[in-house]
Image: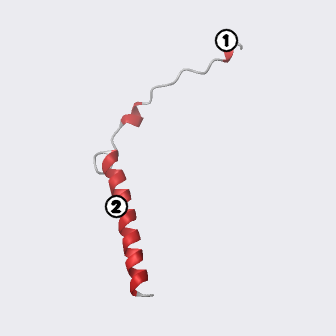
Amino acid sequence: MNPSSSPAPVEKRPELDDAPPLLGSWRNVYLLVVGSFVLFVVLSAALTWVYS
């Protein structure tokens, strides 16, 4: 192996540690997305049951 082919050093990117612009934390964003999905599935199932 050629020592000059070693991988480049990893740069620090502090912007990746920033909080999301909404809801204060990534956990809250993920909970909102999962909650919206569950609500959509339940609503779709209910509408299918009512109109089938």
List x then y, in percent, for residue 33: 38, 57
Quadrant containing the N terminus in the rendered view: top right
Outermost residue toward the top in this view: 3
Measured Cα–Cα span from mark 1 to mark 2: 50 Å
Check disc 1 and give the amino acid type. Answer: Pro
Number of numbered discs overlaid on the protein picture: 2
List x then y, in percent, for residue 7: 61, 21
| Quadrant position of residue 4 | top right
State which mark lies toward you, 1 or 2.
2
- Above or below 21: residue 40: below
Q: Which mark is residue 25?
A: none
Label 2 SS: helix
Residue underneath mark 1: 3
List x then y, in percent, for residue 17: 37, 35
Q: Mark 1: few, some, or many residues within 10 Å (few <14, many ≥20)?
A: few
- Above or below 10: residue 22: below
Q: Residue at x 41, y 69 (%)?
A: 41
Q: Residue at x 45, y 87 (%)?
A: 52
Q: Nearer the viewer, residue 40 or 49?
A: 49
| Quadrant position of residue 48 | bottom left
Outermost residue toward the bottom in this view: 51
List x then y, in percent, for residue 21: 33, 47
Please, which colouring scheme is shown?
Answer: secondary structure
Q: Residue at x 71, y 13 (%)?
A: 2
Residue underneath mark 2: 35
- Above or below 12: residue 5: above
Outermost residue toward the left in this view: 24
Q: Mark 2: few, some, or many residues within 10 Å (few <14, many ≥20)?
A: few
Label 1 SS: helix
Check disc 2 and give the amino acid type. Answer: Gly
Q: Nearer the viewer, residue 39 or 5?
A: 39
